[in-house]
Image: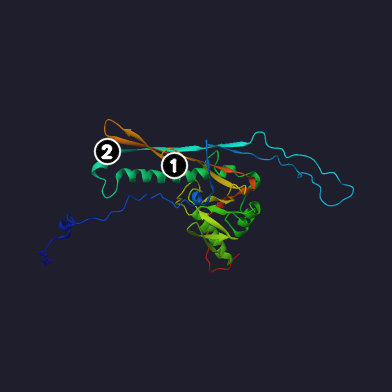
Amino acid sequence: MSEKAINALGRDAAYQLANVVKTPPQYGALTPRWLTGILEFKGLEAGIYRVNKVVEGDTPLDVLCGQDPDKTDIPQGYIEYETKPREYRLNSISTIINVDTKVSDVYSSPFDQTREQISLAVESLKERQESQIINNDDYGLLKNVADSQRVQPREGRPMPDDLDELLTKVWKEPSFFLAHPRAIAAFGRECTRRGVPPATLNLAGGVFISWRGVPIIPTDKLFVDGLKNPKARTGKSNILLVRTGEARRGVIGLYQAGLPGEQSRGLSVRFRGIDDNGVASYLLSLYCSAAVLAADALAVLENVDVGDYYEYTRNPV
């Protein structure tokens, strides 16, 4: 027997008169970008940053110390500078956004179409900026780790001993570890397996696990087998340890200060005009680089295996 029809206004018809609450466009690839928030940045005047260094010898400058009667003359000398110091030049990350003015005129309530398009493009450029700071072939952190600062894991997977080894490389005021979320999870499993769960701490508005009081910052720009979002259960990645700050001879980010049309640090948005078809065009440019002021400001644990899992009911080995 068929169900009796309801003699009332239906939902499909009523929907035509309803106000729909909408969200702005959601950018699925958006990440917190903790690195660019925690790393110290320095604004440049002309897009060039020169790192002047002293030529370091085997022994420090000789000095007079104590009251030895046989040594009365103060030693003389000077500190030599490098004659060809490294210069960092800003890298540009650019894109052009086109918006049909007929669309932006008619369909800009409740959200301005031009503003939303530019906002999504800005997020995309900032995601690329963080990736370049880590992976760029010239100034990227992975490419600028000194050979003496590269560490291999003892057993493939990241263990507390391995992070301790990194701390021996960057022992002068280390600021943070940097790792893919899969690598952080692998390290957490090793800590759980040994009964030494890492502590958590608050930093820059986020909560992070830490090791020896140094926060472990997540980023998907330290790839696993070359991928941001690997599908396989296994894979290899790297873990960085960074000291940041110009005053501490650390790693710093670089950007161009005072850009025309500046929207945020090192990022400008410029209107390029409207063509004969009524399409408005906007140029977005972000200028960035990074500098390592001392070799001991950066170290890396390479070839970390993120795919080991355990049955925790068994005794640790």
Q: Residues within 10 Å of mark 2 (few under 14, many from 20)?
A: some
- Name the residue tied to disc 1: 267
* Residue 89 locus on image (x, y percent): 54, 36
Picture quarter containing residue 95? top left
Front-most of 203 and 75? 75
Q: Is residue 229 above or below residue 211?
A: above
> Which badge, 1 or 2, comes first in the chain's sequence?
2
Q: Is residue 64 left or right of residue 151?
A: right
Outermost residue toward the top?
A: 276
On residue 219, the disc is none
The structure residue drawn at horizontal position 17% and vertical position 60%, both measured from the top left corner, is 11
Contact, CB < 8 Å: mark 1 with mark 2?
A: no
Q: Residue 17 location in percent, x, y?
A: 17, 56
Residue tagged 2: 101
Task: Tell me if mark 1 has few (under 14), some (14-19) or many (20+) residues whose alpha carbon lies within 10 angstroms of its own.
Answer: many
* Colouring scheme, one of rainbow, by chain, secondary structure, one colour: rainbow
The C terminus: image quadrant:
bottom right
The one of 87 and 265 positioned closer to us in this rendering: 265
Q: Amino acid at mark 2?
A: Thr
Query: In the image, what residue type sits under mark 1?
Result: Leu
